[in-house]
Image: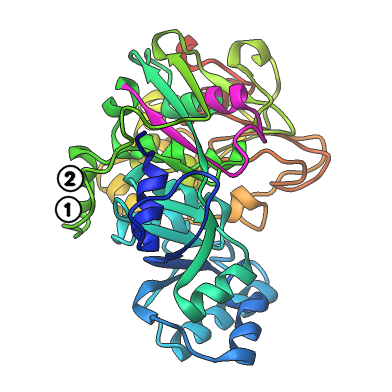
Amino acid sequence: MGYTMSEKILAKASGQASVHAGEIVWVDVDRAMMDDILGPRVEIAKNLKEIRDEVWDPEKVVIISDHYTPPASIQQAEIVKFTRDWAKEHDIKNYFEFVGPCHQIMAEHGFVRPGTIVVGTDSHTCMGGALGAFATGIGSTEMSGVLLQGKIWMRVPKTIRVYWEGHLQEGVMAKDVSLKTIGTIGHAGATYKTVEYVGPTISDMIIDERMAISNMAVEMGAKAGLMQADEKTRRFLEEHGVTDGDYDLASDADAVFCEELSFTADRLQPMVACPHQVDNVTEAVTVKETPIHQAYIGSCTGGRYNDLKAAAELLNGRKIAKGLRLLVSPASDETWRRADKAGILQILAEAGATVLAPTCGVCVGLHSGMIAAGENCISSSNRNFIGRMGSKEAGIYLGSPLTVAASALTGHITDPREII
């Protein structure tokens, strides 16, 4: 009997020859990430102070202030300051702020590598699976233990194998692949399991697109969302200064999966997740007359260079609907600069978009663009829970950056194929 990617990574990290789904193992952590909203300022700093006020390995800890940056209140500013000061006090050299959502920064700065264990105090840490890492979100109490010992116990997850074949038609993006998968499995269908994405469709995707898919594995309840590393992964990491990693890691042909699903990309249409659950998925055409008051392109799910480029190509020479606001937040400072140099941000601005700093603020409803009661927002981000982006009496719809851009032009949810 063979082994899955999860079983192989966790076996190596636990120092065992092999492990199987269901077993509980202690694993060494390669990177521990905290953000400002769920970082030291919660119980983590208190826990460490009470036990041993030092970190097991400051070089392996990454702290990224992204949710409250730029601060929109005194309280937010104080939290960012506390996080900054705590990082300095504990000699955390890998501290970042005002540079964008943590998961993108983790990838761009080489903190996520194939075959490694990455944990973070944010549920979308699973995005690291696009680079072949077992990356997962953990709570503050668990992080306290990691900071003290550099280890964490995990139950080896079962694996759902999701196979995609065929080519995406024009107007369809990786986000649509993600939403279709989530709509099929359900918001709790992969609870404490690994979702492993395979097939020609996935292999054909660039890393930007793969990240959009693995990022949302947690929306099915998944512990991790894994993809096999390949030459595209190697090139991406080499461009960001990383030359090591386990590029031979893959599930064995005779590995045991708890479920196997197959999809055909050629038949996939632009998808939309309707309020107030990510698995409340339908084709965009079925809700095409839903009025939109705000459109958002950004976040760690839908704000990468490829996303901004696709939206700009659709919006080039056009103007967004009167009375509608289009907000754009690049996924990182690197993405911001690259898009600016390519003229993408200018195209978006000329179409009527407001270009923001790289931040989590809009996605989480903390600052930079909350929605009011009775308003609808279509967003390229990852969650549409009630009250997520502002008022509990507002509606959030999730779509690809192309669907968001097309909807911004018409003022209602629109299948981008009607405009391209």
How many labels were placed on the picture?
Answer: 2
Q: Is residue 208 above or below residue 163?
A: below
Residue bearing the label numbered 1? 238
Left of 300 or right of it: where is 192? right
> Badges 2 and 1: C-beta atoms under 8 Å apart?
yes
Q: Secondary structure at mark 2?
A: helix
Q: Pointer 1: residues within 10 angstroms few (<14), some, or many (20+)?
A: few
Residue 407 on the magenta segment: no
Q: Is residue 100 visible?
A: no
Left of 105 or right of it: where is 44? right
Q: Is residue 310 visible?
A: yes
Q: Position of residue 227 (x, y in %)?
A: 36, 38
Q: On residue 235, which mark appears? A: 2
Give the quarter of the image for residue 411.
top right
Residue segment shown in magenta: 180-199
Q: Position of residue 29 (x, y in %)?
A: 41, 66
* Pick the front one: 262 or 241: 262
* Pick the front one: 363 or 255: 255
Residue 190 on the magenta segment: yes
Q: Position of residue 286 (x, y in %)?
A: 65, 11
Q: Marks 2/1: CA distance?
A: 5 Å
